C-alpha cells in the first residue's frame, strides 16, 4: 500500500514542476480580471471625486477647473481649492443635513429592527420546507422596484389619501393630517423598503440557534421574555449588527425616499448631493459632500465590522 | 418545530400586513376607473390601455431590459470569478482589498457610487476618448460593477456549502485546473449562477440613482421615467405598470420557492427510500450469514443510520 502510493506521489510532484509556473500564471490571470475591474470602476472613481472636490466650479464642459495647467507652456501650475470643504463646515445647511441624515437613519434602523425581529424569529421556527416559502413571502417586495414601493405609500399618506379619508370618515379628525412630506413619512419609507435587509441576516443567525438552550431555560423556570433577553438576543447579536449596517449605511445616503416622501425641511445629505449636482451643477461641491459622507460613514462601519469580528471570534 | 408564541405570531402578522398592504392597495387602484385614490369608480382596464399607448415608457422599459440583461451577464462572469478566487484560492496578496471592494457596494450610498462613476467616465473620455458620451455603455459598466458584488456573495455562499473534494478528485485524476472548473465546479454552481443573474437583473432593472448620474440624453431608463412622473403625484398608469411588474416578479419568486421546496421534499424521500432499500438488503444478506438474530438487528440499524447520514451529506 505504502509502496504503491509513494512513486505515485513522487510522479505527481515532478509532473507538477513545469506546470507549477503555468498554474500560478493561470491563477494570477483569473485573480486579475475581477481585481482590475474593481480597481478601475470602484476604487479609481474615488480618486476623481477627491480631485474634483479640490477644483473650482466653472461654466464649462465639464463644469470644473483643472487642477494642473501649463502657464505659457513652461510652468506647471497647481491650483488646489479647499474652499468647498471650508464652506461645507461654515454653512449650517450641510452640517444640519449630515446630522439629520444620521438621526433619520439611526431611528429608522431601530424601528426596522423592532419590526424585523419577530418576523425573523417566526420564520426560523418553521419547518425546513415552510421556511423557504415564508422567506419568499418576506423577500418578494425586495425583488420588486423600490421606487414603486415608495410610490405606493404616496396614495395612502397624501392629504386626500386613504388614511386621511378613513380617519375623517370615522370622525377621528376634522381636517386631513399632514402625513406625507414629513419626517414621519421618511421613517416609514425607510423601515418599509429596508425591512428585508434586516430580516435576512437576523434569520440567518436565528436559524442556527440551538433550541435546547431555550428548552433548558424554560425548564429551569425562566419566562419567555427572560429567555429572549438572556439567550436569543445575545446569540443573535452578529445578525443584529449585520442587519443594522445593511440598513443604516445606505439609509444615510438615501435619496429616493426623502425626495418623494420628505418635506422641504427634511434635510438629508443624499438629497443635498443630488441637488448640488443636478440643480446647481456644482460638481466640486457635490464631490466635497460625497468625500465627507464617506468619512462620516466609513469610520463607523469599520468600527462596527471590527467589533463584530471580535465578538464572533470571542464566541467561536 | 417549536410552538410559536402568540406575541410573535401577532407581530409577524402585523409586519406582513405592513409589507403587503401598500402593494395590494396599489394593485387594486390600477383597476379603478376613477383617478382619485379614495373613490371607487368601478372596474376598468383604461390605465392599462393608456400604459400600452405610452411610447416613451415602452421605450424606457425596453432600454432597461436591454441594460439589465447585458449588465447581469457581465456581472455573473466577473462575480463568479471574484467569488471563486476569494473562497478557493487561499490567501494571496490583495485578498483583503478585493474582499473589501466586493462587499463595499452592498452598503455604499448610491449617490456616491453614481457621482464617482460619472466623474470617472468624464475623465476617461477626456483622457482616452472612451467611452464617448454617456448612454448604454456607461450604464452597463456601472450596473455590472455594483451587481457583481451581489453575484460574488451568492457564489461565495454556495461555494462554502460545497466541499472541495470533487474538485480535488478531478485534479488528482489529472484534469487541468480550468477543466476541473468547467466540468466540476460550474455545473455544481449552476443554481447560484441562475439566482445571481436574476438578482443582478432585478437590481439593474430597478436602479434609479446610479442610472440618473451616468445616463446621457436620450437614454432614460424606465425608473428614471417613472420617477419624473411620480414626482408630480399619483398617476394611475404607474399603478398599472407596478401591478404588471409585481405580478411577473411574484410569479417567478413563488415558482422558484415552490421548486426549491419540492426539491427538498424529493431529496428527503429519496434518502428515506435508499435507507429502506439498504435495510432490506442488509436483512437479506445478514439473515443467512448470522445465526444470531440479535446481532443482525443491531447491524441493521447501525448500517441504516450510516446510510441515512450519507444521504444527508449528499443532499446538502
Image (spheres, rainbow, N blue to C red):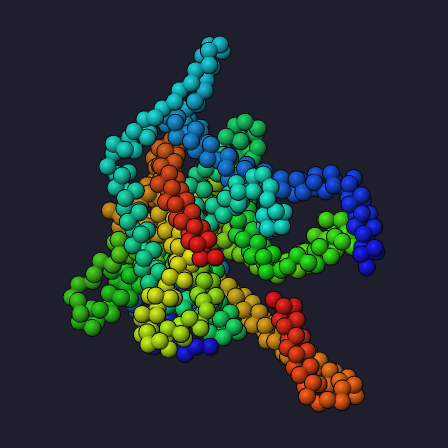
In depth, the one of B235 and A22 nearer the eye is: A22
Quadrant location of residue A187?
A: bottom left
Identify whether B234 is placed above or below B114: below
Residue at x 42% of width, y 53% of height:
A311
Identify whether A12 is placed above or below A198: above
Identify whether B287 is placed above or below A33: below
Residue at x 79% of width, y 85% of height:
B289
Q: Residue A85 in the image: x percent, y percent? A: 32, 30
Task: Evaluate whether residue B255 shows in this view.
Answer: no
Q: Residue A313 in the image: x percent, y percent? A: 46, 53
Identify whether B46 is placed above or below B159: below
In depth, the one of B48 and A306 nearer the eye is: A306
Task: Evaluate whether residue A79 shows in this view.
Answer: yes
Q: Residue A44 in the image: x percent, y percent? A: 51, 34
Residue at x 73% of width, y 89% of height:
B292
Circle count: 0
In depth, the one of A177 and A74 nearer the eye is: A74
User: Would residue B159 appear left or right of A82 to someone viewing this image?
Assistant: right
Q: Residue B87 in the image: x percent, y percent? A: 59, 51
User: Would residue B90 appear left or right of A152 to someone viewing this image?
Assistant: right
Residue at x 16% of width, y 66% of height:
A174
Quadrant location of residue A276?
A: top left
User: Would residue B282 appear left or right of B110 to someone viewing this image?
Assistant: right
Q: Quadrant of the N terminus of chain A?
A: bottom right
Amino acid at each position: 500500500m505504502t509502496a504503491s502510493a509513494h512513486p505515485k506521489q513522487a510522479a505527481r510532484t515532478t509532473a507538477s514542476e513545469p506546470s507549477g509556473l503555468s498554474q500560478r500564471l493561470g491563477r494570477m490571470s483569473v485573480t486579475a480580471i475581477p481585481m482590475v475591474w474593481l480597481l478601475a470602476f470602484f476604487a479609481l472613481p474615488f480618486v476623481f471625486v477627491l480631485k474634483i472636490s479640490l477644483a473650482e466650479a466653472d461654466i464649462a464642459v465639464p463644469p470644473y477647473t483643472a487642477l494642473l495647467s501649463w502657464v505659457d507652456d513652461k510652468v506647471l501650475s497647481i491650483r488646489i481649492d479647499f474652499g468647498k470643504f471650508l464652506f461645507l463646515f461654515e454653512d449650517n445647511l450641510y452640517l444640519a443635513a449630515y446630522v439629520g441624515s444620521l438621526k433619520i437613519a439611526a431611528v429608522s434602523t431601530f424601528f426596522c429592527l423592532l419590526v424585523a425581529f419577530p418576523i425573523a424569529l417566526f420564520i426560523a421556527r418553521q419547518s425546513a420546507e415552510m421556511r423557504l416559502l415564508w422567506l419568499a413571502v418576506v423577500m418578494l417586495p425586495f425583488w420588486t422596484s423600490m421606487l414603486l414601493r415608495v410610490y405606493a405609500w404616496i396614495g395612502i399618506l397624501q392629504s386626500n389619501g386613504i388614511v386621511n379619508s378613513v380617519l375623517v370618515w370615522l370622525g377621528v379628525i376634522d381636517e386631513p393630517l399632514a402625513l406625507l412630506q414629513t419626517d414621519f413619512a421618511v421613517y416609514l419609507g425607510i423601515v418599509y423598503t429596508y425591512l428585508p435587509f434586516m430580516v435576512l441576516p437576523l434569520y440567518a443567525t436565528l436559524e442556527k440557534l440551538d433550541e435546547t438552550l431555550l428548552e433548558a431555560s424554560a425548564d429551569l423556570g425562566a419566562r419567555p421574555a427572560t429567555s429572549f433577553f438572556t439567550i436569543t438576543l445575545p446569540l443573535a447579536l452578529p445578525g443584529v449588527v449585520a442587519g443594522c449596517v445593511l440598513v443604516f449605511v445606505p439609509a444615510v445616503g438615501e435619496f429616493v425616499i426623502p425626495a418623494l416622501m420628505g418635506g422641504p425641511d427634511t434635510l438629508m445629505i443624499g438629497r443635498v448631493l443630488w441637488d448640488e449636482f443636478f440643480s446647481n451643477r456644482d460638481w466640486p461641491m457635490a464631490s466635497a459632500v460625497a468625500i465627507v459622507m464617506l468619512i462620516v460613514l466609513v469610520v463607523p462601519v469599520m468600527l462596527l465590522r471590527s467589533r463584530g469580528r471580535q465578538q464572533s471570534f470571542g464566541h467561536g | 418545530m417549536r410552538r410559536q408564541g402568540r406575541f410573535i405570531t401577532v407581530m409577524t402578522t402585523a409586519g406582513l400586513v405592513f409589507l403587503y398592504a401598500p402593494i395590494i392597495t396599489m394593485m387594486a387602484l390600477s383597476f379603478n376607473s376613477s383617478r382619485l385614490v379614495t373613490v371607487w369608480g368601478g372596474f376598468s382596464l383604461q390605465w392599462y390601455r393608456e400604459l400600452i399607448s405610452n411610447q416613451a415608457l415602452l421605450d424606457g422599459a425596453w432600454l432597461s431590459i436591454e441594460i439589465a440583461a447585458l449588465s447581469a451577464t457581465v456581472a455573473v462572469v466577473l462575480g463568479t470569478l471574484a467569488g471563486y478566487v476569494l473562497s478557493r484560492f487561499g490567501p494571496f496578496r490583495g485578498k483583503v482589498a478585493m474582499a473589501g471592494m466586493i462587499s463595499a457596494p452592498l452598503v455604499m450610498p448610491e449617490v456616491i457610487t453614481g457621482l464617482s462613476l460619472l466623474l470617472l467616465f468624464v475623465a476617461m473620455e477626456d483622457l482616452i476618448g472612451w467611452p464617448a458620451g454617456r448612454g448604454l455603455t456607461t450604464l452597463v459598466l456601472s450596473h455590472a460593477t455594483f451587481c457583481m458584488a451581489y453575484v460574488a456573495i451568492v457564489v461565495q455562499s454556495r461555494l462554502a456549502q460545497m466541499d472541495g473534494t470533487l474538485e480535488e478528485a478531478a485534479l488528482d485524476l489529472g484534469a487541468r485546473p480550468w477543466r476541473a472548473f468547467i466540468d466540476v465546479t460550474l455545473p455544481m454552481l449552476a443554481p447560484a449562477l441562475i439566482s445571481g443573474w436574476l438578482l443582478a437583473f432585478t437590481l439593474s432593472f430597478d436602479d434609479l440613482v446610479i442610472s440618473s448620474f451616468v445616463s446621457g440624453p436620450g437614454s432614460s431608463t424606465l425608473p428614471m421615467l417613472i420617477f419624473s412622473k411620480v414626482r408630480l403625484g399619483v398617476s394611475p398608469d404607474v399603478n398599472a405598470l407596478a401591478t404588471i411588474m409585481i405580478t411577473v416578479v411574484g410569479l417567478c419568486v413563488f415558482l422558484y420557492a415552490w421548486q426549491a421546496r419540492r426539491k427538498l421534499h424529493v431529496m428527503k424521500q429519496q434518502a428515506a427510500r435508499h435507507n429502506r432499500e439498504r435495510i432490506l438488503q442488509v436483512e437479506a444478506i445478514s439473515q443467512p450469514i448470522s445465526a444470531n438474530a440479535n446481532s443482525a438487528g443491531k447491524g441493521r440499524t447501525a448500517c441504516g443510520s450510516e446510510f441515512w447520514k450519507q444521504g444527508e451529506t449528499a443532499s446538502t
